[in-house]
Amino acid sequence: MIPFTGNPLNRASEKRGDAAFIEAKRRDPSTLILPMWKLQPFILGDDGSAELGLFRPGLCESMAAGDAPCVFLGLETGRDGERALFALDVSAASDPEASGPLVGFGRFREARGAAMVLSAKDAAIMGQAKAMIDWHQRHGFCARCGQPTRIMDAGYRRLCDACGAEHFPRTDPVVIMLATYGEECLVGRGRQFPQGMYSALAGFIEPGETIEEAVRRELKEEAGIETGEVSYHTTQPWPFPSSLMIGCFARSLTRELIVDENELAEARWLDRATARKVIEGGRVEGLWLPPAIAIAHHLIKAWAVG
């Protein structure tokens, strides 16, 4: 399963506007709360046994500012019935691993690293929490008039009392595509990537553009190739900060590369046998492909391994 997919929660969006319901769930002893400190989830256990640090109401709230976002993630049904899950921003705490109610339980961990050791279920819930808390941290003021906004609907809306504007969480669509030419696929090294690290090419979909048009435009702009058939593979929520990665394959009509050095450090065609070897854990000197946390890994694997 691709990380951040398969979220098991019932988001219960029809309950978000019911303030009495949300407040009751906030206090319900069966409720679980995920503390997020500077966008890092709290994790219990070591890499081999890591799980989300979820706590009953009354333990971690003292770490949060009075107006800190507390987002209703949804309802989970288990053997003991139904319970609610929330994400709480505790970024106001100065050093929560040195002092406070969570000392000794676990640690806060960078979200990408956490996703690589959590179960698929926990990684998906964490991704939702991270994206939502991140949105609140970046949207405290109205884009229309600049005045402060306040949290509504259990964290899924912000309201500006000054001008009445409503603001909702956004998901930005991104195409990520593996172009192929015969028995080769196109990979590029971003300028921020370490030497030898290559991935599928990607870019944001622009207003008024289809998925197919965005794929062809990005491949033309970044690598100078002309593209024919575009086919959809799968998607991945990517909470950094909040994108939907739309994975595609694209059949290239040309092979000559003209690399946009503002976007890529370099690009290359990779033959199927080499791609299969690396993606299955083999070593090829000077070549690294994305880890399994990234949809690019799954695109390359699907093409190389079949």
Image: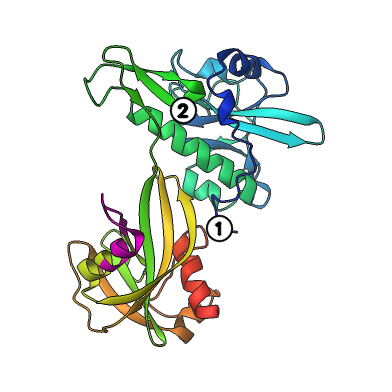
Q: Quadrant of residue 165?
A: top left
Please state which amino acid type lies under the numbered disc 2: Tyr
Lower position in the chain sequence, tag 2 or tag 1 = 1
Of residue 25 and residue 233, the one placed in the foreground of this image is: 233
Q: Which residue is mark 1?
A: 2
Residue at image point 44% right, 64% down: 296
**Disc 2 to disc 1: CB gap under 8 Å:** no
Which scheme is used to colour this image of the protein?
Answer: rainbow
Q: Which residues are magenta?
A: 203-216
Q: Residue furthest right?
A: 79
Q: Which residue is mark 2?
A: 156
Q: Secondary structure at mark 1?
A: loop
Whether 169 is drawn above or below 165: the answer is below
Residue at image point 59% right, 18% down: 22
Please state which amino acid type lies under the numbered disc 1: Ile
Q: Quadrant of residue 59?
A: top right
Judged left or right of residue 80, residue 268 is left
Q: Secondary structure at mark 2?
A: loop
Judged left or right of residue 145, residue 156 is right
